[in-house]
Image (spheres, rainbow, N blue to C red):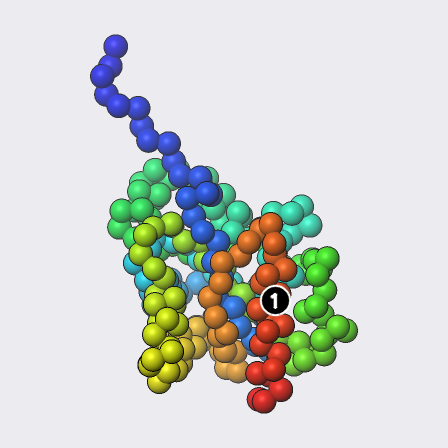
Amino acid sequence: MSDSPAPAAPPSLADFACFCLYGLTDNPYRQAADVARFGQLYDLMVGPHGGVGVGSTFHPYQLVNPAGVTVWYAAFAQLYAQPGRDALFGALAEEQARYVVAPPASFADFHLWPDTRLTSTENPVFSRYIPFVLPLLVRKGPAPLRWDTEAAAAATEPERFHAYREAVNEALRFVQPRPAFVLGLAEFDEQHPERLIDRFIAAKPLLGAL
């Protein structure tokens, strides 16, 4: 009988948080495969947490396919299917590694949610300023996200946060060129997806001043 310990079970989706960089653009569905540029953007937004990004931006109504599967779940499934998944997941946890997966083709089509507030019929402003989301699957850890740290400093150092936001916008250009701009970083709640839509609705007063 062997005394060697049993191999550790690979992590589950519960070991990750489903975050998204969100903003406004003229074309929400764009793809990019530049891993180095993605890493720069990830470092700016997330910081020292291992994670996975999907090599595409999406309209919010593309984030959940007709079968009810989210982009984040599909990204995790791609990693889990890799032959060397134990080493890959270990690098995510221990080395804060970053990976990029290709966008699944099943998410190319729009799938309208029960919450229709982002349609141009309900809010015509979103036909000009179109919502986009860049999904990020972040390994959970005790350190705060870089975005949260910078946002917390905004009350006392508004110029610092302004410069930081501009740096994020420039880092995004490899997948979302001008006139796209970032509104924020948020955790996606699969049980309450309408909370993501709430964030875009909250930005409407800003759009009237642009």
Residue farthest along the right direction in this orientation: 121
Residue 138 image point, x, y percent: 41, 53
| Mark 1 lies on residue | 198
Q: Is residue 152 visible?
A: yes
Q: Is residue 70 above or below residue 35?
A: above
Residue farthest along the bottom direction in this orientation: 209
Q: Residue at x 52, y 68 (%)?
A: 22
Quadrant location of the C terminus in the rendered image: bottom right
Residue 127 image point, x, y percent: 68, 77
User: What secondary structure is marked by label 1?
Assistant: helix
Quadrant in the rendering for residue 6: top left
Quadrant location of the N terminus in the rendered image: top left
Q: Is residue 27 visible?
A: no
Name which residue type carries label 1: Asp
Q: Residue at x 58, y 89 (%)?
A: 209
Along the line of sight, which residue is nearer the eye, 113 or 75?
Answer: 113
Quadrant in the rendering for residue 149: bottom left
Residue 43 image point, x, y percent: 33, 65
Residue farthest along the front direction in this orientation: 156
Is 68 situated left or right of 161 in this image?
right
Along the line of sight, which residue is nearer the eye, 123 or 56?
Answer: 123
